[in-house]
Amino acid sequence: MIHCLHGSVGHFSNWDLLEESLGEDIVSHDLWQLFKKKTPSLAQAAHAINAQASQGDILLGYSMGGRVALHALINEPKKWRAAIIISAHPGLNEGHSERLAQDKQWSHLATSDWHEFLQKWNSQSILPKVTRGLELAPASDQSAVAKSFRHWSLAKQNDLRPLVPKITCPLLWITGEKDQKFTNLAQDCIPLLPNATHFTISNCGHRVPWEAPQAFTQTVQDFLAKVTIS
C-alpha cells in the first residue's frame, strides 16, 4: 500500500496516474480534509497520516505533501517500509520573516479572489504549465488552502535536517533537472539520511510526476522493485 500526499493547492486525484501505471494499491490522502474541523499543525497532520497507515506501508509525498511526509517519517520511522519524497523542502535556515509575509499574501488572495489566486499560483516560473493528470484544489477547498499558507508555512516549519537521520527506511528523493533550488535541497539532505538515494529526472522542473510521467513512474517502479527484493 502506497500512501500519497499531494502538494500545495493540489488535489488528491493527482495520484490516479500512479495507480494506473504501478499496479499498486494507492491511498490518496485529501490533506484539505484535515482543516474541516480544526486547523492542524504539520506535526498533527503527520500524526493523522501515521494513524491511517499500517505497518510496512510506503509513504509518498510531493512538495507540501513531502514536508508532511518527512514529519511522519521522523515521528514513526519504523512504521514505513519505504518512502518517496518529491520536490520537498526540509526547512529554512534563514529568511523566515520574508517567507511568512509571502505566505500571508497568498492566504489573503486565496480568501479574497480564488480565481485570481489560481491564476497567479499557476503562473509561477517554478511551476511549468502542465495539465496531464494534474488537478488544482476546487473552490470548495478555498478556506483550507488559505489556512494552509498560514499554518503550514515553511516559515513555521522547523529545519528538519538535524532530524532526518532518524529516517532509516529506504528513501528515494526525486527532483527535476530544471528545478535547481529543490535539487540542491535534496543534495543537502541525502548525506544525512542513512538509506537514501537522490534521482534527478531530465527535462522537467518542480512538477515532476506530471511533467515526465513515464520517467517518474519508471523511477518509482525501479525503486520499489529493489525494496521488495531486499
Image (cartoon, rainbow, N blue to C red):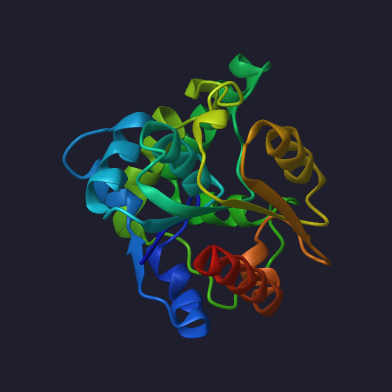
Q: Position of residue 1 (x, y in %)?
A: 36, 67
Q: Nearer the viewer, residue 180 or 197?
A: 197
**Residue 39 appearing in the image:** yes
Query: In the displayed structure, would residue 196 be above or below residue 164?
Result: below
Q: Is residue 49 left or right of residue 183?
A: left
* Residue furthest to the left: 37
| Quarter residue 77 falls in | top left
Q: Position of residue 182 (x, y in %)?
A: 72, 43
User: Residue at point 57% right, 22% down?
Assistant: 159
Q: Position of residue 172 (x, y in %)?
A: 62, 54
Q: Is residue 183 left or right of residue 7?
A: right
| Quarter residue 202 falls in | bottom right
Q: Position of residue 218 (x, y in %)?
A: 65, 76
User: Residue at point 29% right, 37% down?
Assistant: 47
**For the C terminus, which image quadrant?**
bottom right
Query: In the displayed structure, would residue 7 be above or below residue 213?
Result: above
